[in-house]
Amino acid sequence: MTSHAEPTSRRTPSAIDAIADAYFDELCVLSPSISLFLGTENPHGFDDYSPEGLKAANDLRARTLTKVDTAEADGLVTNSLDETDLVTIDAMRERLGTATDLYEAGLQHTVLNVIESPVQQMRDIFDLLPTDTAAGWETISATMAALPRSIAGYRESLRYARDQLSRVPARLQIERVAAQSEALSEADNRFSALAADAAGSVSDTFGRELTARAESAREAFGGLARFLRTELAEHAPENEACGREDYALFSREFLGAEVDLEETYEWALDELDSIDAEQRQVANRIQPGAEFFDVMRMLDSDPQRALHGTKALQEWMQTVADEAITELGKTHFDIPEPLQTIECMIAPSATGAVYYSQPSEDFSRPGRMWWSVPKGVSEFATWQEKTTVYHEGVPGHHLQMGQASYLAASLNKWRRHVCWVSGHGEGWALYAERLMAELGFLDEPGDYLGMLDSQRLRTSRVIVDIGFHLGFNAPAHLGGGVWDRAKAWEFLTQNVAMDRTFLAFELDRYLGWPGQAPSYKIGQRLWEDIRDESRAAQGTGFHLKTFHSRALNLGSLGLDPLRRALLR
């Protein structure tokens, strides 16, 4: 059946596309969470985090890169490589090569942090699985049944890294993830709640099976918590800094580009000063003479900017997102018809995260913006969050990731589904926030201050993350000397207008997931650099709308391959 979502032009798949598609298919067998995330059929359970599973993925990368080399050589002889092939080759070498380097360094065996590691992947996938059909419940049951094996494999990798590689995550990160695992083992855990929700939607026999699988998952997470606190924590280092060598690899992983880390650190310090000065100017327009953090508190208490309850938050998100699609589609962007729909959702996991999930291949499941509101939080301020809707929706992730889904006829499966690079994706979304200000959508001073606050947060992350992990000297107002957790906390509390509970989680995130948080602001910087280089190269022939279309039509890439593709 032909989907209404198909674009009019169709590209004949090449030998390079066939290699990329085959890699994607084999990868989905090794990492079934990909299929679950995309909303496609998944008969393979859940991911294999064991040393054997990680080796199988690395062997697959090696085989694939050998095939790419052979196909490129053949294409050069026959002059059959087009621009799409050249981009795919460049992107695959960058992505698969970086992953191989991480594997060989032992860094894939010790993935453990408070936000994006196996524990959170196994927990959060259930937010995305549909519960409105019998098939949906069967997928939930099969996925739940696979969790004990995935957890066992994860423990094996952590044990292998400890014993064979002398690599153990930092103690504090282990404690935090152990607490998350323990929460999933408690009586009112996520899996038991799902089983209870199934009542009335499934047969009694299936309901008993689902309940039993929920209990097995609960027990497995309890066992993981005990393992982390005993077998692993006693060998863990106190120092959370990963060091230059590891950080350089993590930075490449999240940017798809190599940057000068010293220069980037100094740039971020200067950028923060610039944002601070602009914030003070805007705050003075809102309330002359007041300190800008006092102005923020005033905005938080403004009843005209307040949302009460998650239903009001969801409705407001939807209104802002829909308006952006309508207005931007008139002049600034080409927005295909299937992408003119976005669903704004309140996620059940209550983690505090805001994120986007890609539409299904046929757009029967639209792109969705998720707000995971922590328990007890019921008040929200629109001035600070309007820029977030643009970040997650249009022109941010929804336009970017949805466009990749829309281009099924011209991009291979690997490029449109799993060639995700944080610096490209999050950099684009932060670029989109600033762009919306440039286009006049944040002219109201409070909303503009919210955008600047978002920029300030992301810039502060660059400073803390690079400074801490590379052991740089902290700014003089923190007392100088080498960065540590206490200085990082003091710096963040001075620069980030965020609830202290959220901010404490953010600090744990930065120190446990090196290189990821800076990829937003560094990615934005690289996007702006590429745009400026394109404008300089094209002169009067440069058009911003055309630049955006060309860039988004490439799908997600490492930022070095993106630059080469757009300037070639």
Image (tube, rainbow, N blue to C red):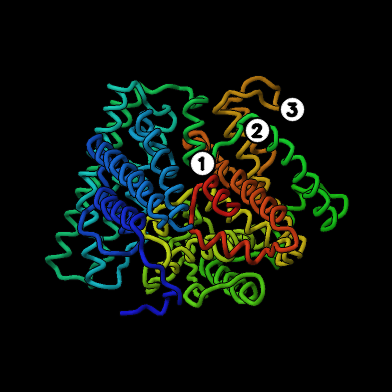
Q: Nearest the camera: 324 or 420?
A: 420
Query: What's under tag 3, amino acid-wise?
Result: His
Mark 2 / mark 3, whichever is N-terminal: 2
Q: Name the residue under label 2.
A: 265
Label 1: which residue? 516
Q: Where is residue 535 in the image (x, y as percent from the top left)?
A: 70, 56
Q: Residue at x 31, y 42 (%)?
A: 66
Marking on residue 538: none
Q: Which of marks 1 and 3 is nearer the N terminus?
A: 3
Taking the view exactly as shown, the residue that stands out farthest to the right is 289
- Which residue is at 55% across, 37% downward? 258
**Position of residue 79 measured from the top left corner of the image (x, y, whole percent):** 42, 55
Judged left or right of residue 327, residue 137 is: left
Query: What's the distance in space between the residues labelled 1 and 3, CA to CA?
Result: 26 Å
Disc number lying in front (2 or 3): 2
Judged from the image, the secondary structure of the residue bearing numbered disc 3 is helix
Crowding around mark 3 (Cα neighbors within 10 Å: few <14, some 14 to 19, many 20+) is: few
